[in-house]
Amino acid sequence: MRTISKEELKDLYHKDFPLWAEINLELLREKLYDLVDWENLLEEIEDMARSDLKACISLLARILEHLYKWDNFRNLAGGETAGRGWIKSINNARKDILAEFKKYPSLRNKLPKEIDKAWIDAVRNLERWLEDNGYEPEEFNIPEECPYTYEEAMTRDLRKDL
């Protein structure tokens, strides 16, 4: 392994991430811990740990968005058959979340605590959808606080409303 200074290694993080990772891996294998770029390495590990939770938050946001559309915007979307796609999307997102829980059981306890973050994303998507359909989002008073519980988001059966 060629020698590289800590400063060069830190610069490499921004210039050539794969090479940075390869060098840090080699340093760890060789137990040259004092040469490892710990600051960036710890940040990467933290990001890895959060990436699966972020994916679940995104799925929960989709559920919340489509629940809200179902409850409030079916009349804007085209009458009686409107919203069937939202139901399908909700059910698919729930299945995807449950699959993530099977792979990463710790997420089961973490996701319910993230409903407020998911609602922020859901509101942004709702506002875009309204704008894309020629409406002013401000006219609809979308609540700042999530109107659904986590339990409702994950279990409410919308098929009975068809």
Image (cartoon, rainbow, N blue to C red):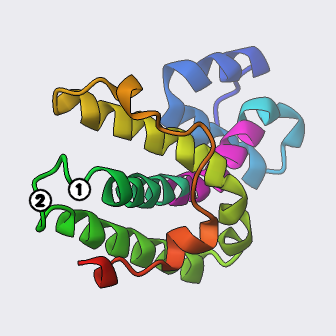
User: Residue 75, can we see it?
Assistant: yes
Q: Say the numbered circle drawn on residue 74.
A: 1
Q: Say the numbered circle drawn on residue 88.
A: none
The answer to the question of whether label 1 and label 2 lie on touching residues, with beta carbons closer than 8 A, is yes
Residue beneath the point at 69% across and 21% down: 10
Above or below residue 77? Residue 84 is below
User: How many neighbours does mark 2 have within 10 angstroms: few (below 14), some (14-19), or many (20 or more)?
Assistant: few
Give the total number of marks visible in the rendering.
2
Residue beneath the point at 63% across and 43% down: 145
Q: Position of residue 45 (x, y in %)?
A: 70, 48
The residue wearing badge 2 is 79
Outermost right residue = 34
Q: Earlier in the sequence, mark 1 or mark 2?
A: 1
Please tell me whether mark 2 sits on a helix, a strand or a loop. Answer: loop
Residue beneath the point at 72% across and 32% down: 40
The N terminus sits in image quarter: top right
Give the image quarter of residue 37. top right
Residue beneath the point at 72% across and 46% down: 46
| Side of 83 where 36 appears, left or right | right
Label 1 and label 2: CA atoms lie apart by 6 Å
User: Residue 26, can we see it?
Assistant: no
Above or below residue 122? Residue 66 is below
Which residues lie in the magenta part?
41-56
Viewer-closest of 92 and 149: 149
Main secondary structure type of the part rendered in magenta: helix
| Side of 66 where 4 appears, left or right | right
Give the image quarter of residue 122. top left
Q: Position of residue 127 (x, y in %)?
A: 36, 32
Please tell me whether mark 1 sits on a helix, a strand or a loop. Answer: loop
Q: Position of residue 66 (x, y in %)?
A: 35, 57
Viewer-closest of 37 and 111: 111
